[in-house]
Each structure stands twice: as C-alpha cells, then as structure tokens.
Amino acid sequence: MKTAKNHPHRLSLSTWATQACHPLLQLATGSPWSRKYNLTISHKHRFIWFRVPKNGTRTLLKSLDSNGVELDVEEAYKCRYPVRTYRDYYKFAVVRNPWDRLVSCWHNKILRKNAFRLSESLHRRLHDFPAFVDHIAVKNIERCDDHYKSQSALIDLDEVDHLIRMESYEEGVAHVFRTIGIEPFHIRSTNRTSTRKNYAEYYTDETRDIVGRIYEKDIHNFDYRF
C-alpha cells in the first residue's frame, strides 16, 4: 500500500485499484480485509498507525517528518488493509478521554472556525457548549464526521498492539518508537489551545451524563472516567 507521490491524502493508482477489488481478492485468497480506517503506514519500520482526529495527530505527523521516518502511506483516509499481509506490523493508536476530546473538538472546529460549514445561525448557536452536546447527541456516532465519531470505530481493536493515552502522550509515543526501533524520537508539539480551561469545567451534570451515554463504548473499551 502506498499514497501517491506529493499527495499524502491520495492513494496511489495501484493501491486504489486493489482497494476497489478487495471483495474479489478476499474471495480468491481467503484472506480477510479490515474495515475502513484512517491509516499511516511505514513498510521500512513495519508499523500501522490508526489516526484518530483530536488525539495528537498533527503533532505526531510533524514529528514523524522531523525525525526522518519514511512513510509509504502518509495520511490516507477510509481505506482497508489485508489483515494477514500486515499481521506482523506493529499497530498503534492514540486514545483520549471522550469528555476532553469533545471539548477539544468544540474549541477547534466550532469556536475558532466554522470547520463543518454549518449555517450561520446554527454555527452561532453551537458556540454554547450544552447546545453543541445536544447537537452531537442526535447523531449516529458511528457514522458521523471523524472528529466526533466514536474512537472505537476508528481503531481496529482486534489488531491493535498498543494504545497511547493522551494523558501520557509523550511517554506513550516514546514507548511506541522505542519498540519499533526508532530512538531517540523527538516530539514536535503543535496545535495546542492555550485558552482552554480544564475540560471538566465545561460540563454540567446533565451534559456530562449525555456525553457519557454517547461515548459509552469508548469509556468501556479504554477505561475512562469523567
């Protein structure tokens, strides 16, 4: 699998064709293919990173570049991989407290800009955080924009080897790249919102419970508490 040269989001023609033919390939070889994920892959270092928006993604992409880590699939979106072919690749992802992640999404995609191209009236209304929570609550959290999609839907939980927690991000990243054999690995921090309060200060008891229900699967899978 590769992305096109100078187009980090676009799969190469041969990879795209393979993706399109995956049902036939799966039938012919008997080898299962994964669901669609946002993937970054290095064949040289034999790793797959399941990218989850709002979980240190820009920081890690910039750090991979500044550390000279060769990537074959840079920033591919919604693509599959043949599970057996990549069985021995080290697979990791970054997870985050769902309550914290939603506040980060609201700050970055609603308060700072109209990232989802909402109508002016709706965008203005969603500057109120409880209104934003209500807006998310009526969505199918498995099939919406990746920025507030369930993290469990963005990670191949049957195949992932290690989960980095945002609460210990630098330590977790260092562990992953030490395991892969890239050491030292220097992290370039980016995208931090200095004006943010602690996430818990944005919640009422009601909105806390609503978000707890929305992201119940993530809370269970990744053992998070408010």
Image: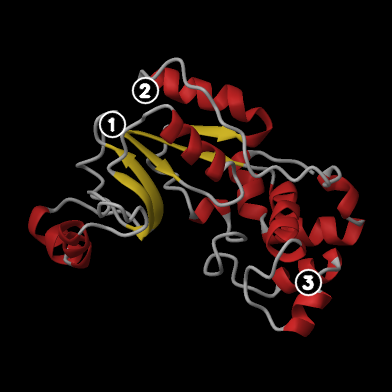
Characterize the local packing of mark 2: few (<14), some (14-19) or many (20 or more) Cα atoms within 10 angstroms. Answer: some
User: Label 1, label 2: how many angstroms apart (C-alpha)?
Assistant: 8 Å
Image quadrant where residue 220 sits = top right
Given residues 210 and 181, the one toward you in this image is: 181
Question: Residue type at mark 1?
Answer: Arg
* Crowd rating for badge 1 (residues with CA inside 10 Å; few <14, some 14–19, many 20+): some
Which mark, residue 180? 2
* SS label for mark 2: helix
Tell me if 2 is positioned left or right of 139 in this view: left
Asked if 2 appears above or below 130 in the picture, the reply is: above
Residue 126, by quadrant, is: bottom right
Foreground tag (3 vs 1): 1
Which residue is at 47% across, 40% downward? 61
Q: Tell me if label 1 and label 2 are in contact, CB under 8 Å.
A: yes
Marks 3 and 1 in Cβ contact (< 8 Å): no
Q: CA distance from mark 3 to mark 1?
A: 42 Å
Please tell me in which quadrant of the rendered image residue 37 appears: bottom left
